[in-house]
């Protein structure tokens, strides 16, 4: 037998079988792994590929179109040949059936009535015995992969490459959505994933199997026969899927451990209970080095945020209704691109630095994002905010000195003098535009501007007074004193 593989042509040379070719002689080089008898209308869900399918003809349709579909279905499932016991129940075969066999190079064989199907099965089983020994050896070696994972601490790509060499398959892994499942392992092409985890595992040229995980499959393993290799069969691919499942569980556990450690580290950084050197060591464990920023996310779908952060070094902490994210500055672009997000980013700082200032900056920025409707605001991006001091005591003194009377008046009367003046200034002192944004009449806004001037003792037509008021409003925002 060529290349130690049993082919359809080899079966024709076995004198005891007395097989003859009725059609599809172009496919006599197809390899044969087994011979199986079936009278089902569609046996393909129970086939693995490379079988000689034997039938007395009960399942063969009587119409020309039905016979063609029956043959095409077998060929698509990887069946090597169809063997008919023509003297029994085979209906008259139409020209369309034979044309399909010739077009596809799908061998149609005839088994004499004197040769029982069990004789064909025995001959095939004896011929593939050597291949069976190879498959068993491959299974035992795949079991050894569990020892490699522990003893040699192999990374995932190296482990999968070893399993590929043992199995004779090229292996791909992906999530149910087609995204990478394990780092460094390629994903299969589109269209190969089954619609259901209960689908038959056989696909043209290989297998597709679910990778088990608690709560449902973590994804799928796709194995294609490698050119020039000796494929070890479905059982070996199933064992590889089990190894992949263990690897997925390990990676998930490691990620969850790092996530919890990251949340604890970020909480301690915000509370300033870590010395700078210990903070730098903790951050290095999470691959956070170089310029770092703090981002406060006030609105974003949880799943979208986690997916955005998944492959990027970061720390994540939920604090009240806010999510705090610490990482490289380019995280801001990814977070800002999320749907329906409201976020604010601090200025960059070095790892290990105290976070109180960064926290104030990020909180100020996220409040500005909420006010303006922008998805993300970076602290210091505005021309005024960057000139404000970092010391909250100085900011508080400025706010109290300029806006103290207005804040107290608003609190006592439920008025909106400060909001009205801020909106007016943000719209370049255009009264009509600001009034529309506040949903009030321009005359009402004009009254509020006059009342604000009286309470602060500042004439808003003066450049000096206007500048002082604008800086005080920015300081109030940084302290979280404005809506």
Image: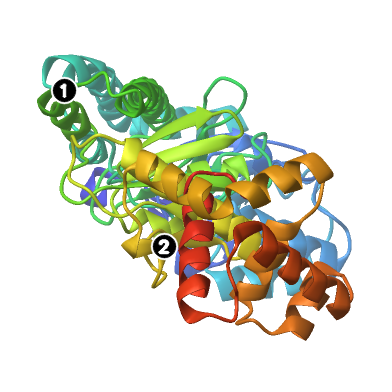
Q: Quick check: 165 left or right of 215? A: left
Q: Position of residue 31 (x, y in %)?
A: 40, 50
Q: Residues under labels 2 and 1: Cα distance? A: 30 Å
> What residue does disc 2 label?
333
Is residue 332 visible in the rendered image? The answer is: yes
Q: Quick check: 329 left or right of 14? A: left
**What residue do we see at 32% from left, 52% from top?**
389
> Secondary structure beneath disc 1?
loop
Q: Residues within 10 Å of mark 1 (few under 14, many from 20)?
A: few
Tell me where residue 426 sits by quadrant: bottom right
Q: Position of residue 405 (x, y in %)?
A: 64, 48
Residue 275 disc label: 1
Q: 120 or 301, which is in the foreground?
A: 301
**What residue do we see at 64% from left, 53% from top?**
74
Q: Is residue 20 above or below residue 139?
A: below
Q: Residues within 10 Å of mark 2 (few under 14, many from 20)?
A: few
């Amino acid at each position: 037998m060529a290349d130690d593989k049993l082919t359809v042509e080899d079966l024709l040379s076995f004198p005891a079988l007395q097989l003859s070719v009725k059609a599809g002689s172009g496919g006599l080089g197809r390899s044969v792994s087994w011979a199986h008898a079936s009278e089902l209308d569609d046996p393909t869900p129970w086939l693995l590929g490379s079988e000689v399918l034997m039938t007395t003809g009960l399942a063969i349709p009587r119409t020309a179109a039905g016979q063609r579909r029956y043959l095409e279905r077998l060929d698509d499932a990887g069946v090597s040949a169809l063997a008919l016991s023509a003297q029994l129940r085979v209906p008259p075969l139409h020209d369309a059936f034979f044309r399909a066999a010739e077009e596809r190079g799908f061998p149609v064989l005839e088994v004499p009535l004197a040769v029982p199907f069990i004789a064909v099965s025995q001959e095939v089983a004896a011929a593939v015995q050597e291949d069976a020994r190879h498959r068993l050896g491959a299974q035992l070696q795949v079991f050894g992969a569990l020892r490699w994972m522990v003893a040699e601490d192999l990374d995932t790509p190296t482990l999968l490459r070893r399993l590929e060499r043992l199995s004779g398959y090229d292996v791909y892994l992906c999530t149910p959505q087609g995204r990478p499942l394990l780092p460094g392992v390629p994903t299969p092409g589109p269209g190969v994933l089954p619609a259901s985890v209960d689908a038959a595992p056989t696909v043209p040229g290989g297998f597709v199997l679910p990778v088990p995980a608690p709560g449902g499959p973590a994804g799928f393993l796709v194995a294609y026969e490698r050119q020039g290799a000796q494929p070890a069969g479905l059982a070996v691919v199933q064992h590889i899927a089990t190894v992949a499942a263990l690897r997925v569980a390990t990676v998930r556990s490691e990620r969850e451990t790092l996530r919890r450690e990251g949340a604890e580290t970020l909480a301690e950084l915000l509370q300033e209970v870590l010395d700078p050197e210990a903070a730098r060591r903790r951050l290095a464990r999470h691959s956070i080095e170089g310029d770092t920023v703090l981002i406060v996310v006030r609105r974003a779908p949880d799943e979208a945020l986690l997916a955005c952060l998944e492959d990027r070094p970061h720390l994540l902490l939920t604090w009240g209704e806010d999510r705090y994210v610490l990482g490289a500055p380019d995280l801001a672009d990814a977070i800002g691109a999320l749907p329906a997000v409201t976020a604010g980013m601090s200025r960059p700082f070095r790892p290990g630095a105290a976070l109180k200032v960064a926290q104030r900056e990020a909180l100020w920025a996220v409040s500005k994002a909420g006010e303006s409707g922008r998805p993300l605001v970076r602290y210091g991006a505005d021309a005024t905010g960057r000139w404000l001091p970092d010391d909250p005591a100085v900011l508080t003194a400025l706010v109290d000195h300029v806006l103290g009377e207005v804040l107290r008046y608003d609190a006592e009367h439920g008025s909106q003098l400060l909001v009205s003046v801020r909106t007016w200034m943000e719209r370049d002192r255009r009264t009509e535009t600001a009034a529309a944004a506040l949903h009030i009449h321009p005359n009402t806004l004009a009254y509020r501007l006059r009342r604000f001037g009286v309470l602060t003792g500042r004439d808003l037509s003066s450049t000096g007074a206007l500048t002082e008021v604008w800086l005080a409003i920015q300081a109030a925002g940084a302290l979280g004193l404005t809506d």
